[in-house]
Image (cartoon, helix red, strand yellow):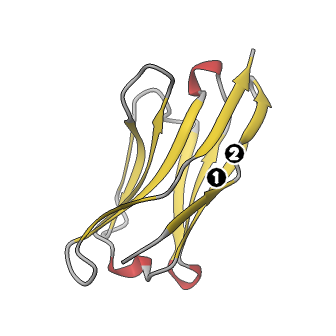
Amino acid sequence: QVQLVESGGGLVKAGGSLTLSCSASGALIGAKTMGWYRQAPGKQRELVAEILNDDSTNYADSVKGRFSISRLFAKNTLWLHMYSLKPEDTGAYYCSAQYTVGPIGTYWGQGTQVTVSS
């Protein structure tokens, strides 16, 4: 089993920046995919950014050029660096890790709230 714990959320004004962190109890190096998702009130959870085991990354069109995903295996930590935040970025942000070997499965954190005021 892998436990993921997010931190770094908060209230920020539009145009501001935040960095979210996700700490894993297990080794992230074994994960096939790691990502950040968000869910706004009344909306479905959506992919924000992901990083694959070949270091390739994918971003939602709405965050391209503003958000950056990174990880450090030595610290079993995943980050989401968010810049030029907009009110529509508001939501609960979740960290996810998918394993196809070892602790097979998709694991989720409990989420951290990001609120961007206009």
Q: Which residue is mark 2?
A: 9
Amino acid beneath label 1:
Leu
Residue 84 seen in the figure: no
Image quadrant in which the N terminus is located: bottom left
Residue displayed at 41% across by 75% down: 2
Q: How many marks?
A: 2
Residue 112 seen in the figure: yes
Image quadrant in which the C terminus is located: top right
Q: Is residue 62 above or below residue 47?
A: above
Q: Earlier in the sequence, mark 1 or mark 2?
A: 2
9 with respect to 4 (left or right)? right
How crowded pointer 1 is (Cα within 10 Å; few <14, some 14-19, many 20+) is rated as many
- The label number, if any, that marks residue 62 in the structure image: none
Task: Name which quarter of the figure residue 7 lies in.
Answer: bottom right
The residue nearer to you, when weighing 112 against 49, is 112
Q: Which residue is mark 1?
A: 20
The reply to whether callout 1 and callout 2 are in contact (CB within 8 Å) is yes
73 with respect to 9 (left or right)? left
Q: Is residue 59 above or below residue 13?
A: below
